[in-house]
Image (cartoon, rainbow, N blue to C red):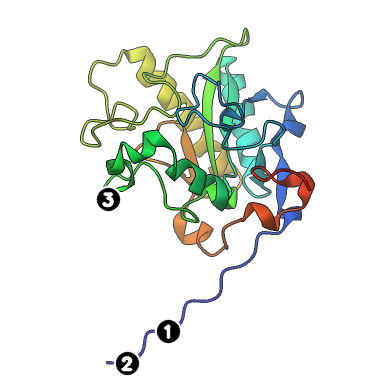
């Protein structure tokens, strides 16, 4: 049996390939709420500061314009605003998540099929190529999407956060989910990109794995001190 061809080396993502999503606030209909930088945030299921309190939300330079275009499309259609919850999640942050009590108590979240948490270094988040989004009204009220952001089911076989789950949801909830997904897909098409709405989570959108996996994941300690999300300065 012949040897398999070696995979090409993964390309590095350099600091200059990342943009701070806070810089788009006020220029596009977006807000930033970096949930995991706040241990007491009601949506921080991990209960710890995975990121530093002063961490910024970084996004790969190829994904950011797509998100902003989708936000513009959504606002034009509905007057609703994107609130960005998470994007770059460095390797060290993924490690911290796996060490929390809630993840240890729910090992099925790490199992295939339908895995809800990625092993460190896997997926779009540690490349800044996946983003989590909810919708807000102009007054800042959250739009009903059926579940909270980052709702992780105890039973992967019954997942109300999944895109194909419709049981008990109102037509309004289903329309809100469709609006968010349609705006992201429309923006991707306009910009000549391919975006994947993650099946298990209505809030998660990412580049296709066969593209994002050509890049190496990002380690927090490899970033300049002022860009680090997990490690303290110094």
The residue at which mark 1 appears reads as 5
Q: Are marks 1 and 2 in contact (CB under 8 Å)?
A: no
Q: From the viewer's perspective, is the residue at label 3 or at label 1 nearer?
A: 3
Could you say where residue 31 lies in the image, as x and y percent from the top left?
A: 66, 23
| Image side of residue 71 versus residue 25, left or right | left
Which callout, 3 or 2, points at the residue further toward the start of the chain? 2
Residue ID at (33%, 14%): 171
Q: Quadrant of residue 176?
A: top left
Residue 80 left/right relative to 17:
left
Element carrying mark 2: loop
Q: Position of residue 178 (x, y in %)?
A: 41, 26
* Sequence-first disc among 3 and 1: 1
Q: Nearer the viewer, residue 41 or 100?
A: 100
Does the image show residue 193?
no
Residue sitting at 71 percent across and 43 percent down?
232
Q: Dot 3: what SS?
A: loop
Residue 140 figure quarter? top right
Circle 3 is placed at which residue position?
112
> Where residue 2 is drawn, which disc sits there?
2
Q: In the displayed structure, would residue 113 be above or below residue 33? A: below
Task: Check the image and name the residue furthest to the top.
Answer: 139
Q: Secondary structure at mark 1?
A: loop
């Amino acid at each position: 049996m012949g040897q398999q061809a070696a995979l090409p080396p993964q390309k590095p993502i350099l600091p200059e390939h990342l943009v701070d999503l806070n810089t788009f606030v006020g220029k596009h209909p977006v807000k930033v709420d970096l949930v995991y930088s706040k241990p007491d945030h009601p949506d921080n299921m991990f209960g710890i500061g995975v990121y530093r309190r002063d961490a910024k939300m970084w996004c790969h330079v190829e994904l950011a314009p797509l998100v902003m275009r989708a936000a513009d499309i959504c606002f034009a259609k509905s007057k609703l605003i994107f609130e960005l919850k998470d994007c770059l999640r460095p390797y060290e942050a993924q490690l911290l998540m796996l060490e929390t009590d809630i993840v240890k108590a729910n090992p099925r979240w790490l199992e295939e099929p339908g895995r809800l948490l990625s092993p460190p270094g896997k997926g779009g988040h540690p490349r800044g190529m996946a983003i989590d989004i909810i919708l807000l009204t102009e007054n800042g009220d959250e739009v009903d999407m059926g579940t909270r952001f980052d709702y992780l089911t105890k039973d992967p076989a019954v997942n109300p956060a999944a895109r194909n789950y419709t049981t008990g949801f109102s037509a309004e909830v289903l329309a809100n989910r469709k609006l968010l997904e349609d705006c992201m897909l429309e923006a991707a098409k306009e910009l000549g990109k391919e975006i994947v709405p993650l099946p298990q989570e209505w809030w998660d959108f990412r580049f296709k794995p066969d593209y994002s996996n050509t890049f190496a994941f990002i380690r927090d300690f490899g970033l300049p001190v002022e860009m680090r999300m997990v490690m303290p300065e110094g």
